[in-house]
Image (cartoon, rainbow, N blue to C red):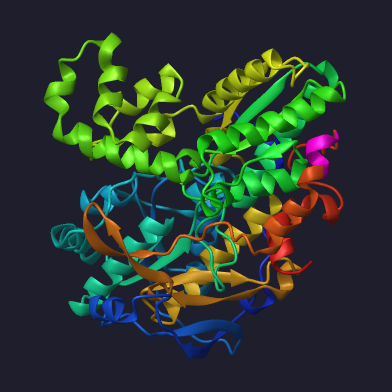
Amino acid sequence: MTKSALQIARAAYQPKLPKALKGAVKTVIGAPTQSVADQDAIKQLFPNTYGMPLITFEAGEPMKHAPINVGVILSGGQAPGGHNVISGLFDGIKSLNADSKLYGFILGPGGLVDHNYMELTSTIIDEYRNTGGFDIIGSGRTKLEKEEQFDKGYEILKQLGIQALVIIGGDDSNTNACVLAEYYAAKKYGVQVIGCPKTIDGDLKNEMIETSFGFDTACKVYSEVIGNIQRDCNSARKYWHFIKLMGRSASHIALECALQVQPNVCIVSEEVESKDMSLDDVVTYIAEIVATRAAEGNNFGTVLIPEGLIEFIPAMKRLIAELNDFLAANAEEFSHIKKSHQRDYIISKLSPANAAVYASLPDTVARQLTLDRDPHGNVQVSLIETEKLLSEMVATKLATWKAEGKFDGKFAALHHFFGYEGRCAAPSNYDADYCYSLGYTASMLIADGKTGYMSSVRNTTAPAEEWIAGGVPITMMMNMERRHGEMKPVIQKALVRLDGAPFKTFVEHRERWAKLTDYVYPGPIQYFGPSAVCDQPTKTLLLEQGK
């Protein structure tokens, strides 16, 4: 395999570890826990793994450990640093006993069910240290929900003598890890299950999980490219760039990138929802900034848009819900309506408020809302080109204002969607260190006999020496939510807090950024050079910790 100069240099990078993990480790038992909500329901569903205490690790006396066989699964979408979680896990179990073995299940949770695995040896691990992607064993989106899956998985775990399984994933994957831990504990199978917090969207966090891995790197990659676009924007001085960013369920990425690059506009979905803004309100807000800048002779700018914005606009949410129900019940009749008549047909069948919203949409978006459904019959919101929808509607509004003499500028839009560019980037120093520590911490939770825990590394805005490693019961993060018509236990998603320091800081500056061209150009992720450049955590984390 041909390697770039950067790959060769990064292979030699030794991730930093908290001092508590640098030798023998002692477990400190903390306070018992309860779920964030719906305590009785969660306790009933997880009698064997509910209410367990928080765990922290400190330096301890050396102890002999028997060899331990561990399995690892990468679940869901890729995030930078996954390979370092596996490297840290591998080094951790080998530090306990050199005869310990690590097995990787291929292509996600499906590999466990289908008995598709490989042993991860030091030769393999060394090829993947500090690299991006999940290609060491691949990932998948199979949900571990059924007892037959659990039992099928147990067959191979038993056959390989695997005593613990580490599931690296987001909120859904870790919910599945918790269900699996509970099942194996109830059956007394003697298999521990540990989770690791992964998602570039940043919506898996709480007081014990201060950030999910991959968020730091993805935001740095996106901010670099947005910075490049802003430099071009300020050079050409004739385009408005509408940039959609990953984050269907929360706007953490858009907000963090805004704090890093200082764009003219950044929409935060959670604010749109809390203010009950309509689509027209959002369009008017952007159009007013375009008009204000044009009056100063600046017919250019940047607009950051979270991927899931449409679902946060209350009127759109109501329209989509009614459309889903109507098309599910009338699919046959709708299929016989001529394409040219479909729009009028839908308008005639919707309630007046939703019909008005639907009628206001550009043809392309209106058609997409009625045609493309997912396997559950729902609109595939992530396919809606929100960046084009907004720029088209802004252009229409500005044309109206021009006719009324309220706008005298020019408006030309370019569109971008940054998603996959950030998911498999080589991890930043922060993510390389954080992920390695998460994997190493998981090995210590296994050595201590824990199950149903998520690996936790905190205080990460301090030097790595001072990071706090430990474990948090996954049940502590859970609540009950309606999924596909039934109430299910799930890890509560962390949305952007409108009373939080990151959002408040953004609000404090956004008016100035809107009017002025006050762009910041962060440049690429830096691996070599002063610590102030190479090791800085996200603005979000620094602001949340008052730094």
The region drawn magenta spans: 512-516
Residue 26 screen position, x and y as percent? 55, 87
Q: Is residue 295 left or right of residue 425?
A: right
User: What residue is at 23 percent from the left and 73 percent from the top?
Assistant: 184
Please give the count of numbered marks on the rendered protein.
Answer: 0
Residue 225 screen position, x and y as percent? 70, 32
> Which residue is at the front of the view, 525 or 33?
33
> Which residue is at the front of the view, 91 or 237?
237
> Which residue is at the front of the view, 522 or 375?
375
> Is residue 372 found inside the magenta-colored segment of the image?
no
User: What residue is at 43 percent from the left and 71 percent from the top?
Assistant: 477
Residue 441 seen in the current view: yes
**Can you tell which quarter of the image residue 289 is in?**
top right
> Which residue is at the front of the view, 374 or 508?
508
Q: Is residue 81 above or below residue 465?
A: above
**Can you tell which quarter of the image residue 516 is in?**
top right
Residue 114 screen position, x and y as percent? 21, 48
Q: Is residue 165 above or below residue 354?
A: below
Residue 162 seen in the current view: no
Quadrant in which the N terminus is drawn: top right
User: What residue is at 75 percent from the left and 14 percent from the top?
Assistant: 410
User: What residue is at 79 percent from the left and 22 percent from the top?
Assistant: 232
Residue 387 screen position, x and y as percent? 56, 28
The dominant secondary structure in magenta is: helix
Quadrant in which the C terminus is drawn: bottom right
In the displayed orientation, state which residue is furthest to the front. 404
